[in-house]
């Protein structure tokens, strides 16, 4: 079970915490991490590319000349894909690229990403993100203590002062623990995890604590 230091916003040690070995000390599965990042990026695609088929472009539907007797190739419409300004054949159409990963795969990828960040020394547990107000200068002063450009704050719940104070800082992201993704973890140079958020992640991602389905009526427990 990894035992890590708990820091304050001055980057000074104020205690220690035992992190769940199954979540923060798991074997890093690079394939699961790849699949999770691939799924996230696919879900972020807008899928708005669109081309016009022959029925969508402007132009008359009148037959240009009679079918036979002219010596020319037969042609039925100026909107034919064979003509300039005609419709497009098999072009891209609006679509949804998003898909869902199996629950166990998503949880396994998160465990691998958290373990990799802790192993590489890029994850820091902070006692709490307590700011007097929502001014940006307070959050920036705290970030200067940790010496990182791209930072991910992970809070257990809503922290209004932190969210408002960090929203104008470039390279800073604030997420609640339930919204943390593998992509955000890997994208950050430093992950600042509140002590309460670390406990929530340990509880939610620990496979030994997974809830077993309740027996239905008429079934034996």
Image (cartoon, helix red, strand yellow):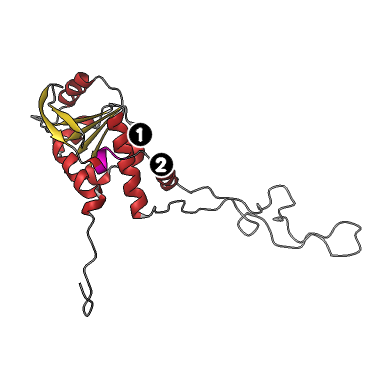
Q: In this view of the protein, which residue sits in the foreground, 161 or 24?
A: 24
Q: Is residue 57 left or right of residue 122?
A: right
Residue 87, image x and y in percent? 66, 53
Q: Decide whether residue 15 is among the magenta residues.
A: no
Q: Is residue 46 above or below residue 194?
A: below
Can you say which quadrant of the picture contains the C terminus? bottom left
Residue 113, image x and y in percent? 33, 38
Label 1: few (<14), some or many (≥20) within 10 Å? some
Rendered image quadrant of residue 79: bottom right
Q: Which mark is residue 37?
A: 2
Q: Image point 43% across, 51% down: which residue?
A: 98
Secondary structure under tag 1 reads helix
Q: Which residue is mark 1?
A: 186
Can you say which quadrant of the picture contains the N terminus? top left
Q: Is residue 213 above or below residue 22?
A: below
Q: Image point 91% across, 63% down: which residue?
A: 69
């Amino acid at each position: 079970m990894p035992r890590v230091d708990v820091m304050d916003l001055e980057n000074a040690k104020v205690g220690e915490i035992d992190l769940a070995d199954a979540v923060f000390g798991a074997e890093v599965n690079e394939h699961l991490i790849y699949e999770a990042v691939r799924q996230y990026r696919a879900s972020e695609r807008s899928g708005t590319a669109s081309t016009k088929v022959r029925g969508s472009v402007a132009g008359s539907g009148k037959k240009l000349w009679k079918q036979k007797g002219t010596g020319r190739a037969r042609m039925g419409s100026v909107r034919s894909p064979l003509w300039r300004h005609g419709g497009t054949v098999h072009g891209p159409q609006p679509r949804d690229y998003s898909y869902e990963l199996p629950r166990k795969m998503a949880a396994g990828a998160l465990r691998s990403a958290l373990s990799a960040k802790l192993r590489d020394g890029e994850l820091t547990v902070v006692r709490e993100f307590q700011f007097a107000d929502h001014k940006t200068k307070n959050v920036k002063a705290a970030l200067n203590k940790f010496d990182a450009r791209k930072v991910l704050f992970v809070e257990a719940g809503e922290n209004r002062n932190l969210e408002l104070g960090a929203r104008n800082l470039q390279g800073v992201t604030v997420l609640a623990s339930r919204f943390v993704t593998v992509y955000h973890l890997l994208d950050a140079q430093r992950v600042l995890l509140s002590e309460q958020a670390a406990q929530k992640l340990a509880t939610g991602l620990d496979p030994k604590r997974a809830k077993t389905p309740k027996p239905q009526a008429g079934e034996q427990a």
